[in-house]
Every structure is written in C-alpha cells, then in structure tokens.
Amino acid sequence: MPQPPDHGPRETRDAESHAEAFQKTRDARRTELVEDYVELIADLIAEEGEARQVDIARRLGVAQPTVAKMLKRLAEDGLILRKPYRGVFLTAEGQRLAAECHRRHEIVERFLRAIGVSDEVARHDAEGIEHYVSRETLEAFSRFVASQPV
C-alpha cells in the first residue's frame, strides 16, 4: 500500500514554489496576447508595408471589434501608432518587443526541430511555448541549437 506524502517543511517550500510557478504562468498569459499582436503587426508590415485592422482580424481569426479593442490597448501602452485611412504601425518600443518575440520564437522552433519535431508542429508549438519559457530555459535551448551540426 502506498505511503501518504510527507507533510513536513518541504511541503511549505513546494507550495511556495508552485504558487510562484502559477504566478509566472498567469503573467505570461497576460502578455501573450499583446506579444502575438505586436509580432503579427511586425509581420504584416514586413510583408505588406502596413498592418490593417481587417488583416489582423483575418490572420487571428477574430472579429474586427476584438482587434479594435486590443489596438486601443496597444496604443495606450505606447506600442503602436494608428494613422487614419492607413494602418497600424509599431513604435520603437513595439518594434523592440516584436524583435524580442521573433527571436524567442525562432530559438524555440529551432530547438524543437533539433530534437526531432516536424517543421509544422515545431512552428505551431513554438507559438505557444515562446511566451512561457523562462530566460534560463531559452538560453539553454539556444546553446543546444548552437551545438548541433549544421
């Protein structure tokens, strides 16, 4: 018969560790949507010269009012500029965040491919993992990928 878990001092440490991990996950969830929008806006600007609300909605598979609400938030946060009858453009801070997101995505995707994950699955999984991976883990992924033969 299995023994019940030990409820000594270690449990308190584990509870604190779990709480910290859950808090980091909640924080990542809050920033994930912002990062996805900024990253997509950067992609659209690179591909089409500007990012229009209708294109953002189509790419994300959401309604335009949903995009409008997020764009308002991004503008308030100083990440984008909106130009009437044009589109959405990234501020310097928005460009910095987009570049950071692209870098994290690339590292995670390359790591997943290096361990044998298919291209399509690696691309999709990296989209989620990139927001939740710690700096330490990301650096380990990067070192691992760099150590692989080309």
Image (cartoon, helix red, strand yellow):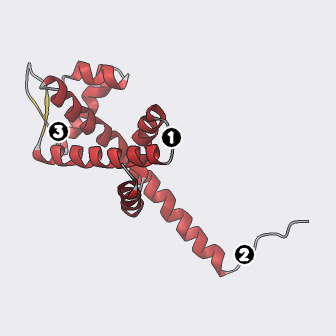
Labels 1, 3: front one: 1
Q: What is the number of the mark on residue 7? A: 2
Q: Which residue is mark 1?
A: 117
Q: Could you tell me the amino acid type at mark 3? A: Ala
Q: Is residue 10 above or below residue 19?
A: below
The disc, 2 or 3, on the residue closer to the chain's N-terminal end is 2
Q: Is residue 22 above or below residue 98?
A: below
Q: Position of residue 34 (x, y in %)?
A: 30, 41
Q: Residue furthest right?
A: 1
Cβ atoms under marks 1 and 3 closer than 8 Å: no
The disc, 1 or 2, on the residue closer to the chain's N-terminal end is 2
Q: CA distance from mark 1 to mark 3?
A: 37 Å
Labels 1, 2: front one: 1
Q: Nearer the viewer, residue 81 or 49?
A: 49
Residue at (45%, 47%) from the top-left corner? 114
Q: CA distance from mark 2 to mark 3?
A: 49 Å
Q: Nearer the viewer, residue 51 or 110?
A: 110
Q: How many marks?
A: 3
Callout 1: SS: loop
Q: Which residue is mark 3?
A: 75
Q: Is 57 situated left or right of 97 in this image? A: right
